[in-house]
Amino acid sequence: MNNSIKGLLEEWKYIRGITKCCVENLRDSGLDKELPRKNLNTIRKQCEEMLIVQECYIKALETGSIKFDGYQDQEFLGDSSQEELLKKCDDLDWLLLNKLEEFNEDEKIEWFGEEKTIYAHLAAMISHEATHVGQIVAFCYAENIQIPQEIVNRMALSN
């Protein structure tokens, strides 16, 4: 694995660490508080969606083509336990690392008719998770959900 992919994985670990910290430290009341967003209207549902989307990114490493199909936002029930979410994070991250170990960095991923490098593919996965993390933090501020101190420190947030 080259240094560029390793650098992207470090950024992935950073943003995924923040997601996991939310799941680990928010109470059910915080994870399930109804938010001003259609469909993905709880933090728990957003986490479920992030994991399904990560599966799409990993599958694209196998197939050579990204597809975001097989689910709809309104189908997320928000019924995954904290333990299930954390296990799924760990399982998918392990799978991602193993796929990247065997991946030839010169291979391309087809994105809706356009070829993208592995670097662009991974950056898009990171951006997706980071967008949700930003939404989660904003929702916490707006809905008076206590942001875990570890996240406040990691992201240099104000209280």
Image (spheres, rainbow, N blue to C red):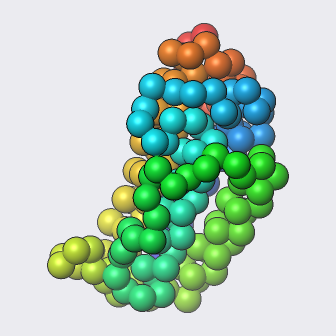
Residue in the image at 59% along x and 37% along y: 43
Residue 79 in view (yes/no): yes
Q: Quadrant of the C terminus?
A: top right
Q: Position of residue 18 (x, y in %)?
A: 63, 41
Q: Position of residue 87 (x, y in %)?
A: 77, 60
In the picture, measured across the screen, residue 79 lies left or right of residue 62, that is right
Residue in the foreground of this view, choosing between 13 and 48: 48
Residue in the image at 56% along x and 16% along y: 143
In the image, farthest residue toward the left:
113
In the image, farthest residue toward the right:
83
Residue 42, image quadrant: top right
Residue 141, image quadrant: top right
Residue 140 against residue 40 in the figure, above or below: above
Q: Position of residue 91 (x, y in %)?
A: 71, 69
Residue in the image at 71% along x and 41% along y: 23
Residue in the image at 22% along x and 74% along y: 112
